[in-house]
Structures are given as C-alpha cells and as structure tokens.
Amino acid sequence: MTERAGVAIIGAGLAGCLLACYLARRGERVTLYERRADPRLTGAERGRSINLALSERGLDALRRIGLDGKVLADALPMRGRMIHGFEGGLDFQPYSACGDRAINSISRGALNNVLLDAAQALPGVEVRFEHRLVRLDPATARLWFDTPAGEVRAGAEVVLGTDGAGSAVRGDLLRHRCTTERLDFLDYGYKELTIPAVAGEFALDPRALHIWPRGRSMMIALPNPDRSFTCTLFWPNSGMRSFASLGSPAAIERYFGEQYPDVVPLLRDLVAEYQQNPVGLLGTVHCAPWQAHGRVGLLGDAAHAIVPFYGQGANCAFEDVVVLDRCLDRAGGDWVEALPLFERGRRADTEAIAEMALANFVEMRDKVASPVFKLARRIEHALERALPGRYVSRYELVSFSTTPYSEVRRRVRTQHRVLAAAGLAVTLGAAGAVSPLWRHR
Ligand code: FAD
C-alpha cells in the first residue's frame, strides 16, 4: 500500500507523459500510473496504430519543452498524398500551396518512449507501471489499482485521466454521476497490414502518405524508419465488401487483387496478417463535463477521442496539455479554477476537430480521386499563393498552424462564402456581357 499526494496522472500514453513533463516544470509532484509494463523494456503493445502523423500542433507542444528535435530525428516527412487509382496510376497532391510543408510519420512506440524518458528524468516525477486503475472516488481523489502484487490504494490532491478513449477515470466519473457521455461509433473499423522493405529500400515513395480511395472504403500507408510501410484498411464492419464478408484466403487474395492490384505483390504476408490482425473500433467520444470538484479532470482521448481521418487525435491531445498549462498560469496554479477554465476554453475546439475529422473521411475515401476535387485543390492553392495569409486552406490551418480548431472552421466557412459570392458575381457579370448578344439573335 502506497500513499503519495500531489498530482496523479492515470495513463502514461502520449498525453499523460507530456502532461507529466509540463506539470513537473511547474514544480508539481507527479505520479504517473500506467496499466502496461514499461514499454521500453517489453516493446510496444500490439493493437494500436503503429505510426501516426504528427503535425504543427503536436510539434508546437513538444517544442515548448525542447523535445521536438529528438522526436523529429526519426520522423519521415510526408509532403502530400499519393493517390493510387484502380489501374495502379499515381497522382501526387501536395498538402501545401508552396509544396514544401510536411506532416511527419512517427512511430507511436518511439514517441511514447521519448516522452517517458523525458518525464522520468524530471525531478518530482515517479512512474508506476503495471498499475491499472480499477476504481476512483472523485470526491476524495482516492484511487484503487490492480497490480501484479495485488490491490494498491493511493491518494492525490488532483487526478488527471489521460487513459485513452476507454478511460477508466471517465467511467468512474460516470458512475458517480459527475459526467455524462455519448459514444458515436462508426460502422467502420480499421486493420493494419505491413509492406516490408524490398532489398532494404522503401517499396513505395516514403515522402507521401499513400491513399487507395475506393468510394465506401479506403486503405492508407505511412512509412516507417525501418523502410517498411504500415497500411491501414478503413472498411465497413458489416455488409458487402466489409471485414465481416471476407475470410477465406482465396476471397482475401481475390478482393485485394481487384481493389489494390498495385500493392498486392508488396503485401508479402497479406493473408496471414489479414486473418491475424484485429479490427479496431473507430468512434467519437462526447463527454461533459470534463472535470469534477476541481480535482479530477480528463484530457486527450479520455475527454474527446475522435476518428483518425485528419491525423489530429494525438496532436489535439498534446495541444490540450499546452492549453491546460496556460489555464494554470492564469489561475495562479489553482486547480479548482484551472480545470473549469480549461474546459470552457477548449470544448468548442475539440468539437470542431471532431466534426472536421469525420468530414475528412469522406474526402479521403471518395473525393480525392475525383477530377472536380483535384481542380478545386489546384484553385485553392492558386488562391493561397495569390492572397498569402488572406486565403488559407482548411488543411493548412489544421495541420500547419496552431489556429484554434473552432476558428479554423469559422474562417474556412467565411472564405467559402466570399468565394461563392465572387463566383456568383463573375457568373452574373459574364451573363450580363453575354445577354445582349442573345437579345440580338
Ligand atoms: P492513449 O494514447 O490511448 O494513451 C492512454 C494510456 O492510458 C495508455 O498508455 C494505456 O495503456 C493507459 N491506460 C488505459 N487504461 C488505464 C487504466 N485503467 N489504468 C492505467 N493506465 C491506463 N493521432 C494523430 O495525431 N495523428 C495520426 O496520424 C493518428 N492516427 C491514428 C490512427 C489510428 C488507427 C487510431 C486509432 C488513432 C490515431 N490517432 C492519430 C489518434 C491518437 O492515437 C490518439 O488521439 C492518441 O493516442 C491519444 O493519446 P492519449 O494519451 O489521450 O491516449
């Protein structure tokens, strides 16, 4: 049995470790509890995405504590989308108007390890692995953990839940009627496959995020430092052409041959991986409020998990940490004031990115291959070059800036309204110029 006051962070994943670093810098005593064994000794847990795209918001949070360089050392910059057509044709679409901005493919495990090392190196931070939170009393901040040595109890002044989409902290807030939640699951799931290196080299261009848009479904691939690619299938869970409908080796090979013919020769263990790898859930967590009694709070996926189609879940979780740090500054370190302040300032932004992430699924799986979409992107990039700083695309604002997500949504709507009005004016002007001719006919 152990007792330690200070701040208890539940979950030493991406948000929890970064949060520990930020709080330790403020002079807080932090105990980080993690259900897994130390991943630096046992390797990363399977069943989560192997790599993820880190962009400006995440990098900004790392930069503020001097960790960006270390994380970026192993990153693979992806400057655009490489669209794979049915016939194997390729179309590269840069992310930014200038063509040189990139999102970064990072190993989730390596990123988590850098953050764990950084947190553990700070005075005042203690990490306890193999401590699974099983019960929390929100009013007293008493904690109960399941460990290999049996039940362990602890206490804290403040408890912060960064324990992911299936948060146990959120579960206990619910049980004590301190919060409400709504889980919106998609009818889609995800499964990962591997494209190994070919003769020690990348089998596809590593400078792009690869997409096989197929209307109702899609596959994407991100490069890894070992020169492999991790492919992720985003398919319907049930019905025709779904995870449920495909089981036998022959059916798997036939379907991949039809849908992704260019990549079949590269997926060396296709059937075995397809049959063995799990199908992950995809959904959005809506929960309110995110805090109780000014002493228990939720951050990251525990508060607002989103679907991964904008590559923003981890970026948003990192940004949460920066925003909470600012709230603590404003509240003079008083948690009772800071936690509600954080929620008031942050909720509109997390709702905005949740909505934009869902909309981006349709764009990625369907629209990116259409000639109309491609033309619209070219016009958008031309406008960005012609009106620097005045017209900025949604992708640019989400991925390459720290403009609050809710402001991104507002700004993009205004830009689209102005463009539509300008388009209408041009059309009417052209019609006005043409109509006399019609009259003379
Ligand atoms: P997590 O990373 O889930 O960490 C939670 C931690 O809490 C874990 O270590 C877990 O073991 C621990 N824990 C859980 N329960 C307990 C308990 N009871 N007691 C103690 N510890 C516990 N985001 C991006 O920014 N870019 C991307 O490209 C991207 N791609 C993605 C692709 C896929 C397929 C998926 C599913 C997600 C993707 N995301 C991406 C989202 C990103 O993974 C999450 O938003 C991010 O991991 C959230 O971090 P977190 O620390 O809040 O939660």
Image: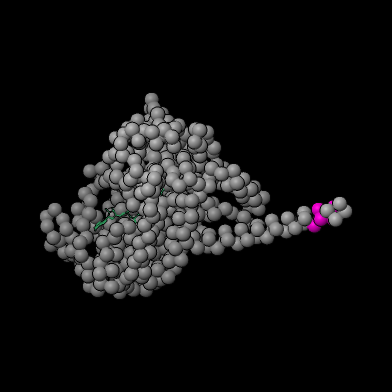
Indicate left or right for 258 with 165 as reference: right
- Is residue 270 placed above or below 233 in the rendered structure? above
Nearest the camera: 41 or 179?
179
Q: Main secondary structure of the magenta part?
A: helix
Q: How is the image coloured?
A: one colour
Dividing the image into 4 quarters, which one contains the N terminus? Answer: bottom left
Indicate left or right for 138 with 262 as reference: left
Nearest the camera: 285 or 318?
285
Position of residue 176 measured from the top left corner of the image (x, y, whole percent)? 25, 72
Position of residue 82 measured from the top left corner of the image (x, y, whole percent)? 50, 39
Q: Which residue occupies 16% across, 58% down?
A: 146
- Is residue 270 placed above or below 20 in the rendered structure? above
Indicate left or right for 233 with 387 as reference: left
Q: Which residue occupies 44% across, 59% down?
A: 354
Residue 290 visible, this orientation: no
Extent of the magenta region: 432-437
Position of residue 48 measured from the top left corner of the image (x, y, whole percent)? 32, 47
Q: Quadrant of residue 21?
A: bottom left
Q: Which residue occupies 56% across, 46% down?
A: 96
Nearest the camera: 209 or 258?
258
- Is residue 133 placed above or below 229 in the rendered structure? below
Position of residue 52 measured from the top left corner of the image (x, y, whole percent)? 39, 46
**Quick one: which residue is furthest to the right in this view?**
440
Q: Quadrant of residue 106?
A: top left
Q: Which residue occupies 42% across, 31% down?
A: 203
Per the image, is 345 magenta? no
- Label tally: 0
Residue 289 visible, this orientation: yes
Indicate left or right for 406 with 313 as reference: right
